[in-house]
Structures are given as C-alpha cells and as structure tokens.
Image: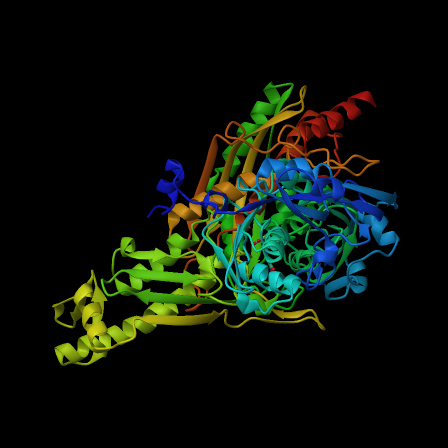
Amino acid sequence: MKHFDAKLHVKGKSIFAGDIPEPEGTLHAAVFTSQHAHGRILSLDTSKAEGFPGVIRVVTAGDIPGENEIGNIVMDEPLLAGDTVHFIGEPVAIVLAETRSQAYKARNAVSMEIEELEAVTDPREAARQGDLIVPPRTFSCGNIHKAESDCIHLISGTAETGGQEHLYLETQSSLCTPGEGNALQITSSTQSPSFVQKIAARVLGLPIHLIQVDVLRLGGAFGGKEDQATPWAVMAALGTHLTGRPVKLILKRHEDLINTGKRHPYSCDFRIGLNEDGKILLWEVDYYQNSGAVSDLSTAILERSLFHSTASYFIPNVVATGYCCRTNLAPNTAFRGFGGPQAMFAMEAAIHKAATETGLPVEKIQRINLLNPGDTFPYGMEYTCNEVRSSWELAEEFSHIAETRRSVQEFNSVNRYMKKGISMMPVCFGISFTTTFLNQANALVHVYTDGSVAISTGAVEMGQGVNSRIRQVAGEIFSIPVERTRVESTNTSRTANTSPTAASSGADMNGNAAGIACREIRGRLLKVAAEKLNCEAGNLYLKNSMVWNRNGKTDISWDQLVAAAYMNRTALSSHAHYATPGIHFDKKTEKGRPFAYHVAGTAVTEVTVDCLLGTYRVDRVSIVHHGGNQLNPLLDRGQVEGALLQGIGWVTMEELAWDEKSKRLQADTLATYKVPDISFTPDNVNILFVEGEELEDGVGLKGSKAIGEPPFMYGIGAWFAILNAMKAFSPEAFPGYTAPMTPERVLLALTEKNRS
Ligand code: LUZ
Ligand code: MOS
C-alpha cells in the first residue's frame, strides 16, 4: 500500500501551513534577532521601525502578558531576550506589518546596542568553566577497576562528532487567528501541538483550553520541530493576542538556518579494555555535549546517549558520564537518533582504534562482542532477542562479504590512487521515549452514518506516512477499504495532552490508540448485528465490508450495519488512550526497563576514495533490518533509505562551521552547507527486511516495529569504510576519529602523511 499523500505531493496539492489562505487582515511577522553570540543589551530602539510603512506594532519582552521564560524540561529560554543575549539568532523583537516585505524592511531598522561578553562555543571550555545545564550524569555497571587487571589491552582516545542541520523542506511556519474573547487558533508546523498549546498559554497568561493548535502536515521535521517549532508559533500567538489580528510567521531559509538549533556536536573521551581474544571487558566514556545556549531537549538527548553508550555490544564493566555544556550557539535540539548516533560513533571509533593498536581485525572485535539474548545493558534492562547477532550474520551472507572483501583487495592491489574500503555497522536502538510519562497517546474515532470513518490522533504527519499506517489499522479492524477511512488534522481540541510525534514511536502509540477506539466501536456494532440476526455477538465478525458468522457471509453489509446502529441510537464514536505497557525507569539508580523493545540490524558499506582528490563515492550499502511483521513495507523501505542517506550525510559532507571570532554560523546557506543529493546517493542500496522477534500484543503496531530513527545509524558505516579505504592507500593516514569526514579532511590526512 502506498503513502496516501504521495499523489497530493507530486501534484503540488498537499496543504502546508504556508498554503492556508490568509484570513482578511492578516499581519506578517519578521523577527529581529541578536547578531551577537553573548552580550548585555544596553539599548533597544524600535521607534524607527515603528514608523515604517505598514507597521502595526513592534513587540518586545516587556509586552508579554504572562511568562517570558519558556522551555521543555528546564524553563531557561526567554521567548524574547530581556537584558542579555546568548546566541546569534536569539529572538529579540517581533515586527508586525501589513505585508511580509514591509515587516522585513522595518525589521532591518530595529537597532540594538550590546556590551559584548565572552562567548564560548567549545563544550569542553564550557565544562571547564562549570557552565553545565544540569549536573553530570553517570550510567554504570560492573566494576571497571577490577576489570582493568583482566584487560590485556587498554586503549584510550577521543571521538568528535559534528552537528547537523535538519534541513526540513518546510521552514518553521505558523499562522495564528483570533477567536472569541481571548481564544486563539494556532496552525503550526510542529511535531508537538500540545507543547505549542501549553507554552502559548504560559506566555499569554491564559488557560490552556483557550488555545487550539491544529496541524495538518509538516514538510519534514526530523526532530527539528519537536521543540523548536514552539517559539515561532508562540510569537505568532503573541502578535494575535496583542493586535487582535491574524499573524503569519514563516522563517526564510537563511533565518531558519541561523536561528534554530541543530544536532548536538559531541566531544568524547574514551577508554576501552579488551582481553586477548578481543572481548571488551571495560568501557569508560565521557560525553561533552555542545548543548547550545538553553536547555531545550539537551538533557533528554544526553540521557539517550548514555542509554546507547555500549551501542550493539555487551560490555560487563561500564562507566559512562555525560555533560550538558552550555555554549553560545543556537540551542541544539532533537534530531533523528536523539543522542544515539553520537554515542554509537564513539563506540565504533574505540573499537576501530583498538583493532588498529592490537592488530585484531575490526570485524572480529565487533562480532565477538555483539549482544546476545540474556545480556544486560548498563541500565539494567535485559536484551531478550537475537537480532543483533542474527542481522550481522545475515548481513555477511546478504552482502557476500567474503567475495566483496576479495574484490576490494584485488581492486586496491591494481589501483594506485583509487582505493576501496568496506565496513560493517551493527545498530541496536531502544524504542520508547526515555522519559517514561511521554509514552502515551490518544485517539478519537467517528464512524459517520454513511459508513465512512474519520480518525484523529496525536500523531503528526511529517512525510513519514504515519497517517497511512493509522488508516491501515482502522481499515483492517472494520474490514473496509482504507479509502473509506480518513485521518484528520492533529488538533488539540480532538486529542488532548499528546506527546510529540517523536522517538520513532508515533505510529506504534497512536496506531494502538486508534486501534483501541476502533475495536470499541466494532464491539458495539457487532452487538447490533447480533440483535438483528438473533445470535451471539461473539459468533460474528467483519470481513470484506460484510458481517460474517460461523456459516459464512450474512446479508448485512458494513453500510447497513452502521445505519442500523445509528437508528438504534448506538454510539458511533469512541475515544481511546494508549500507554506503552511494561516500561519504567528509576533515575536514582539509573536502572529500569526504559524501552518497550529494541530495533536491530546491520549495514555493510562499500566506498571508493579518490586519494588524489580526497573525494569519495558510496558504492553499495547492504542492510539487514529486523522490522518485525511489517505493516507497510513500502513506507519502511522509504524510511530506511532516507535515514541511511541522512546518516551518511552527517558523517561525510554535512559540516557546520562557525567563525572563530564572531561565532557566526558560516554554513548558513545551501551553498556552504552541503547535503547528499541524488547523484551522491549510493548506486546500490539493498535492504533485506527480516521479521525477527515476535512482539507482545499492544507493543509495536500489529507486530511491526518502529522504523523512523534506527536506520539513521547505518550511515555511520560510511565513515569507517572511507577510513579503511584511506588506510589502503597509506596505512598511517589518520584523520582523527572526527566526523564529518569531508573530502577536505580526507585529503589533508592523506597528504599530512605524505609530507612526513
Ligand atoms: N524525544 C524525547 C525523543 O523527548 N525523548 C526521547 O527519548 C526521544 N527519543 C528519540 C527522539 N526523540
Ligand atoms: Mo525526534 S529526534 O523528534 O524523534
């Protein structure tokens, strides 16, 4: 079954926030932001802008009727800067004008005087200064001091991973319209409608029920709209509240690149200890997370790094410590993988370094340490299935690894400047929000008198196809064609207190909530049918839009059944709540069962590096992915392919650079920030989906597993394949365990060796 939005998208008929016809009297907002990374505001002059044509009002912190301090976990983020600014791009004033171009022209006339303060962008420097968002946190198990004496090899090193721009196609967008009294309706391109609603209420000093947030669909998000859609939506709401007029706020691409946070860069110190067989006995790691200027979701992201510190491996003695370092960059935020990729890169770097120093093959160390059923993670949860190891073994077969290795060797022996490299990348990712209470969802289902079905859930459609999956669930329970179902916009008046559509769990949780509501209605309908047929409801079921009993098809159709139920005054709507079962976590002991299950798989990546130019191509990626009993194989494939390429981009060409002195983002246009395009896409991406472990009822979605984030980390394999190719050219070439591996970095590492 296809993605239901596909046709709309290719015809340009899908509606995004910016496509909604502007109501009469709509004002356009342009946001004046800080041009300094850190400073005290000496004066802010909006008077000139106020006199510009079309300008209705310029809003500053003093105009906020409620709280100016917002935030997700810690309330440390001013909606509009008060007396200091903490990053370039920090919102200071909102210019409201009759047209967009008037708003932007007037915005350029706002002026601000700043007394510069020292700006820090290096997380280790922030840590040295003690500028942490929360105290450090440690996950541990076993006893590393005792383990030390059993280790033959003790290897330490560092690993660095860069940030990443989300580059959703649709920039941050919102439109707010006034209702009666103080009521407001906000259309926002957000993954978290309920969060926008709550923060708008807080900033305006209103009860939550006066604010309705509606989301039809997003043009991509990738985590970038889990938390960071909120301030822009709330600024629009503030404008409407203060002027009584609709306000539209859509960031231009250049602004979006500068003003919004990205994936967190990490700087890590590690120590890995192995016995003579290559068994990892000890793992000690410190993560210095570059959190940016305010907390945002940084603490939760660091927590996920700690959960994934041992990646796909079993290690008996572990101490993993994380530091959320406050810096003067735009607040870094959720991004597909949510701290997992950074931790997994550090682990793979350590294994690679251990292999280089001990002479053991990397794959041997990886393989011998893969998780086995019955192994316990440092956070106390048992790994119960065999998918890490089975995906590894299947990936060896699927990619014809022995043959591939031989042909790589042969290629490298006959080519002087072109070298091929290969790597294996196992992935094991925990599914559930690590913040346990977020693992809940709700749904509202209506069956109309003509038999058509409308479903509302807390899930946000952002291109991932969650609505298609939810329709499949409803279609199957009612046994009607999916075309007779519809998923409504995500609206806080129909589904309240919803969690963000995030953590790969949107389809699992909202699909289950929709399923509960549909089954409730089906039960009522079958009772109606039983009365008509004079039999037990338990003997009846729905199939192919008909009521069936033990002897086969009855003559009651779905349409007749629904009509009869209505005439009979039977409720045709149901609201349901779902809470992921069996999960818990104790932050005092840092132990528990935080995840409903794990998703695992293995990627084999082959690359070719041009060692004269430093450029490279990813030739082939072979992936064995345990997806459960797939509900929608086509959507799953799309998610794996997209995530893989996004992961490859993160470790290869996507490089964020900030000017050393001004701390200004230099990669602030698509001319300077490079992402993989169609020509960089590997010629061969072969994916084998394997069912694997059976999930309990009510976990996953109808036996299928979450797909959004886990495949991102397959991309990490490209970094190591490139390094291996470089080593075939020059064994001493070493670029540092630093991602991204840009062509520049490749070339420098190769030539540095040649110079020495
Ligand atoms: N968001 C969140 C997430 O709030 N908690 C999580 O554990 C998470 N994991 C992945 C992506 N987003
Ligand atoms: Mo997310 S990184 O919004 O699942």
- Residue 312 rendering spot, x and y as whole percentages: 60, 54
Residue at x 51% of width, y 27% of height: 679
- Of 369 and 344, nearer the camera is 344
Residue at x 34% of width, y 56% of height: 486
Left or right of 197, for residue 513:
left
- Residue 386 rendering spot, x and y as whole percentages: 51, 58
Look at the image and tell me whether residue 282 can be seen. no
- Residue 462 rendering spot, x and y as whole percentages: 48, 49
Residue at x 67% of width, y 20% of height: 613
Tally the marks: 0
Left or right of 708, for residue 238:
right
Look at the image and tell me whether residue 753 can be seen. yes
Position of residue 713 relative to residue 553, above or below, is: above
- Of 423 and 532, nearer the camera is 532
- Of 193 and 187, nearer the camera is 187
- Residue 747 rendering spot, x and y as whole percentages: 71, 25
